[in-house]
Image (cartoon, helix red, strand yellow):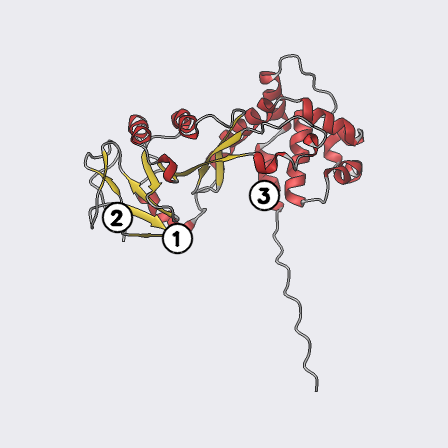
Amino acid sequence: MAAASAAPPAVPLVNLAGTIEFLHTHLTTALCHTVFQRVRNRERQRRWTLAALAQFWITVILTGPRSLTQVLQEAGVVLPALGPAARTSPEAFFQRAERLRPHFFQTLYEAFVARLVPDAPATYAAVVSGLRERFPEVWVLDGSRLDAVAHRLKLTWDVRSPLLPGCLLVLYDLCRGLPRQVAFCADAARSELRRASELLAQIPPGTLLVADRLYASVAFFAALSQRQLWGGVSAEPAAESAATQSPAARPVRGRDAHRAAGGGRLRRRGAAAARAPHPLAGPPRSAG
């Protein structure tokens, strides 16, 4: 008897109903209107309001359509919540997206996150949840230039002059799985270390800030100390970081009291450790 053909693997289904309800609870039309009035100079609401744009992009992120034009052409049927914007042409959307200043979206995101954080459980990345016994928050810092995505944007296809796409710097809340700050800089040549130092004032005191070896700088650790923050930076090119105290960091070897994170697990490694105690913590403890 011929062997039965193997059934194709089942496609996992993810119920996003709770996520969508959570988003709509905190990203409201009233919040969008308040942000628009706060940021606007001479801009008008028009049919593509800030609330309609936010609703549209949430739908695009959650559904992953093949093209934006297809979604816009079917908006009157699949996105009735857009209101008058659903009855406009795709060209009206692209024109609005091109002309509306990015500051509107950045301010909206910051206001949204401020409302979201109190209700967001700190249950993400459970493998490092033990760090919260020592640190009230664990954030990740990283930057990226936007050259790789600049030519993939439809708005740039007809631009003949050289593009200067700029760069991003993100502060990611590891325990909540949430980008707490997304900072755009139009000058991609500006020092990432300097831009990061300017964001430290937005991080709660006592937070452990994890970053790559670019941030293994005496000046950066001095800035962390001034803000009463902890720093964990990569000591080697491999994905291995050492959580250290600040200030007065110095390289050490052996089994001194320190913490090192690598490969998702905490283990002992040669790291940078500080002699002076951190103002917000007791004596150092090693994590086995």
Mark-to-mark CA distance, 2 and 3 = 42 Å
Q: Earlier in the sequence, mark 1 or mark 2?
A: 1
Q: Circle 2 — which element?
A: loop
Residue placed farthest to the bottom in the image?
1
Q: Which residue is mark 3?
A: 19
The answer to whether marks 1 and 3 mark residues whose Cβ atoms lie closer than 8 Å is no
- In the drawing, what numbered circle is on residue 263? 1
Query: Amino acid under label 1?
Result: Gly
- In the drawing, what numbered circle is on residue 219? none
Query: Amino acid under label 3?
Result: Thr
Mark-to-mark CA distance, 1 and 3 = 29 Å
Q: Residue at x 72, y 34 (%)?
A: 81
**Which of the two discs, 1 and 2, sits closer to the camera?**
2
Asked which quadrant contains residue 171, the reply is top left
| Residue 143 shown left or right of residue 151 in the figure | left
Asked which quadrant contains residue 204, the reply is top left
Q: Which residue is mark 2?
A: 270
- Vertical placement of residue 22 versus 192, above or below: below
Q: Position of residue 251 (x, y in %)?
A: 23, 40
Binning the other alpha carbons within 10 Å of mark 2 as few (below 14), some (14 to 19) or many (20 upward) gives some
